[in-house]
């Protein structure tokens, strides 16, 4: 229905709590989920089969993980065994979903942690086979079998090569955090030390965002003590900038979220803490981005009495007013916090919702680039991020006083790029993969490719001059690139192997993508 609902994990003998959003108010909803009355750690709403509805994955450190298929009408079926996922207790905390092999189906990384290394389990990567089943590919993919006391992970393309990498937070100063670099062939290489991201702390969350809007995604990691803020340098290395940005948060840190709370075009930061009534540590904190990469805790932001045993947090927009709200879970029988954003700046906003066709249905792993008066912002779609959390399925952007976005560019894991120009703000903008020709600017230019399927020759014609043609194969490998200034051109495709290709055609109005078959 377009409204963000809330799901809460619970303790033993108490099933998951589902709260349906009814115009900004929430009503607890009964959902038919069999045998889910034990302690759960994280829930992921994830479309495992690309059928357009959300299935449910629940982790537990006491009773084993469960995967439930959404059958519609609030009915779910436990398919854990049929899907090939383990039902034994792995002592799992976190789970994150991404498409590591770019086949259009979401895979899952499972983070396991017990009280000690001796009693814990290694982490697991399960490949989605696309037929409702999963295969454990941990060993062949290069995921080590050591026991790391891992809280959570995130799929992130840290080097912008089109392949999702995996970053993992490890607890208890025993094992360093890990960064698995995706080699693009179904395997990973541990790259933590080489990238300077292998911090040795009591790591809790993995929170991803581009705080300085340079197009390279950064990582915030909470800690028992000083937190770490890894700035992505764009050369496959990171630098800890927690001190220089003012975000050390020297406390008992747990969850963290990036959000543009005042829609002023830069990302602010909220961090949860379990330092309840402490004289030593600060409680949860809201950091405002001052626009120059420096963060400050503002006075009178509403969090002055935020003093609880807080752990997880997740963002959404409960009343569709374009202001990002968030929910915080607390332990020790303290109530949940639902923080409603009451910012009065009157800044404008944009929410983007993706629907994949060649890529996975929810567009997880896509990069969304927007430009506002020439100033760029970047969003990255995740499923299962932060400390045991999952954010809204919308991507949020603040526009400041601007009412129109120069352009929106979505780069999907398939390699397809969709570009839209002159998009009005203060709306939910839906993007269907491969459909960007529907906008007015692209309607001015009609491009045709023939024959399709092609054999030895590809002919391309357009009503306006084509400036560049780039062709990628299904593995997202570039096989052809050439600049032009003509509306009629011919490409020799005789050396192309049979299969599926994607042709990106650039004109003065932008870029559009076409699917092509070589016989």
Image: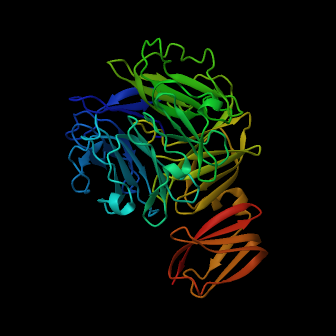
Residue 183 position in % (x across, y down):
49, 63
Q: Is residue 42 visible?
A: yes
Say which of 64 and 444 sits in front.
64
Q: Is residue 230 left or right of residue 307?
A: right
Q: Is residue 322 visible?
A: no
Question: For the N terminus, which image quadrant?
Answer: top left
**Residue at the (54%, 25%) spot, across then down:** 249
**Residue at the (51%, 69%) spot, across then down:** 475
Residue 416 position in % (x across, y down):
58, 63
Question: Vertical placement of 74 versus 284: above or below?
Answer: below
Colour scheme in use: rainbow
Question: Vertical placement of 71 versus 306: above or below?
Answer: below
**Residue at the (72%, 70%) spot, across then down:** 468
Question: Vertical placement of 258 versus 333: above or below?
Answer: below
Q: Quadrant of residue 30?
A: top left
**Residue at the (68%, 69%) spot, across then down:** 505
Say which of 235 and 60 sits in front.
235
Residue 14 position in % (x across, y down):
24, 29
Residue 218 position in % (x across, y down):
58, 43
């Amino acid at each position: 229905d377009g409204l963000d609902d809330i799901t809460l994990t619970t303790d033993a003998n108490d099933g998951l709590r589902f709260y349906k959003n009814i115009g900004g108010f929430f009503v607890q909803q009964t959902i038919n989920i069999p045998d889910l009355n034990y302690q759960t750690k994280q829930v992921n709403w994830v479309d495992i089969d690309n059928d357009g509805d959300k299935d449910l994955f629940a982790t537990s450190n006491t009773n084993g993980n469960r995967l439930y298929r959404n059958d519609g009408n609030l009915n779910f079926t436990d398919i854990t065994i049929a899907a090939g996922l383990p039902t034994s207790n792995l002592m799992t905390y976190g789970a994150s979903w991404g498409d590591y092999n770019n086949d259009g189906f979401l895979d899952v990384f499972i983070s396991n942690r017990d009280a000690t290394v001796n009693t814990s389990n290694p982490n697991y990567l399960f490949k989605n086979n696309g037929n409702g089943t999963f295969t454990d590919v941990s060993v062949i993919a290069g995921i080590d079998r050591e026991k790391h006391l891992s809280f959570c992970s995130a799929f992130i393309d840290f080097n912008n090569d089109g392949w999702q990498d995996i970053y993992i937070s490890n607890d208890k100063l025993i094992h360093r955090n890990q960064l698995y670099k995706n080699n693009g062939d179904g395997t990973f290489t541990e790259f933590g030390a080489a990238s300077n991201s292998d911090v040795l702390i009591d790591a809790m969350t993995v929170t991803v965002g581009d705080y300085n809007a340079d197009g390279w995604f950064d990582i915030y990691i909470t800690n028992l003590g000083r937190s770490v803020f890894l700035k992505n340098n764009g050369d496959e290395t990171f630098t800890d900038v927690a001190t220089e940005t003012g975000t050390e948060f020297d406390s008992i840190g747990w969850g963290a979220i990036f959000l543009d709370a005042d829609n002023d075009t830069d990302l602010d930061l909220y961090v949860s803490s379990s330092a309840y009534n402490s004289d030593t540590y600060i409680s949860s904190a809201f950091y405002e981005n001052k626009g120059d990469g420096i963060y400050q805790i503002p006075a009178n932001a509403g969090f002055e009495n935020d003093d609880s045993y807080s752990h997880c947090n997740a963002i959404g927009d409960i009343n569709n007013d374009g202001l990002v709200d968030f929910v915080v879970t607390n332990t020790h029988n303290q109530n949940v916090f639902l923080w409603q954003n009451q910012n009065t700046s009157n800044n404008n906003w944009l929410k983007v919702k993706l629907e994949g066709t060649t890529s996975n249905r929810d567009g997880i792993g896509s990069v969304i680039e927007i430009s506002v008066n020439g100033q760029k912002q970047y969003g990255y779609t995740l499923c299962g991020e932060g400390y045991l959390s999952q954010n809204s399925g919308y991507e949020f952007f603040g526009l400041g006083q601007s009412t129109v976005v120069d352009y929106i560019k979505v780069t999907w894991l398939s390699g397809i790029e969709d570009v839209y120009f002159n998009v009005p703000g203060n709306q939910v903008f839906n993007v269907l993969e491969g459909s960007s020709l529907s906008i007015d600017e692209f309607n001015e230019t009609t491009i045709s490719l023939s024959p399709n399927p092609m054999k030895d020759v590809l002919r391309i014609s357009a009503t306006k001059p084509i400036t560049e043609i780039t062709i990628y194969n299904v593995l997202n490998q570039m096989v052809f690139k050439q600049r032009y200034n003509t509306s009629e051109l011919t490409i020799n495709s005789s050396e192309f192997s049979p299969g599926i290709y994607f042709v990106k055609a650039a004109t003065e109005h932008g870029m559009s993508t076409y699917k092509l078959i070589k016989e």
